[in-house]
Image (cartoon, grey):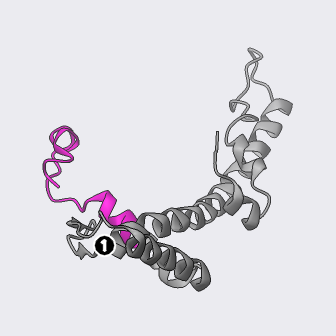
Amino acid sequence: MQDRYHNLNALTNHTNIEDPLIKWDTILKEIIGKELPRKKIAKICSDAATLISRSDILRYTYMTDLHGQQLNLAETIAYPKIEQLANNYAKCHIISLLQPLRETLYYAGSVSQAIHCKDGTLRIPYMSDFLVYLDLAKSKSQILKKQKWP
């Protein structure tokens, strides 16, 4: 961890902080355990097993997860796909946290338009374009389907 964040640690004088990638991986593992459909995970694992059984070349790998745990060949193939699926579910959580902020910013901007300072400037910057991509996410199913975000 010291090597990965050397520049940030030097700027902030923090040397004993937990690795943010490990924190994110912990969150994803919780999502995988609680929210991902078991059928989708089983399908990904089955596809990995099929790939291994059909491959004459790919027989061994040495790879660890972010916590340093060694992954077997099937996990090496399947886990990135499972993790990507978990990332989509994490987006749902992030958007649900940002939605009230967006609504507050829109409201503050509308009120600010009605109350101008004496010099004609707005008291609060108009935020109509801030977090506009949240308008694209009306439901959890839309969020899970959406692949590209602005």
Q: x%, y% of residue 124?
A: 69, 33
Q: Furthest residue to the front?
A: 56
The answer to which image quadrant residue 24 occupies is: bottom left
Residue type of the residue flagged with mark 1: Leu
Left or right: 100, with 36 as reference point: right
**Residue in the picture at 78% in, 64% down:** 139
Residue drawn at x 78%, y 48% is 135
For the question of whether residue 54 can be seen, the reply is yes
In this rendering, the count of numbered labels is: 1
Instruction: Inspect this view and state whether residue 31 appears.
Output: no
Residue toward you, 93 or 10 = 93
- Residue at 27% x, 76% y is 72
Q: Nearer the viewer, residue 141 or 95?
A: 141
Q: Please tell me whether residue 16 is drawn above or below residue 109 in the rendered image.
A: below
Q: Residue furthest top?
A: 119
Point out the image quarter for the C terminus: top right
Q: Which residues are magenta?
A: 1-26
Instruction: Judge whether residue 8 is colored magenta.
Output: yes
Quadrant including the N terminus:
bottom left
Which type of secondary structure does the marked residue at label 1 adopt? helix
- The residue sitting at 57% across, 85% down in the picture is 38
Q: What residue is shown with label 1? A: 73
Looking at the picture, does residue 147 appear above or below residue 6?
Answer: below
Is residue 143 left or right of 9 when viewed as pictured? Answer: right
**Position of residue 116 measured from the top left corner of the image (x, y, whole percent):** 79, 25
Near mark 1 (Cα within 10 A), the count class, few <14, some 14-19 or many ≥20, is: some
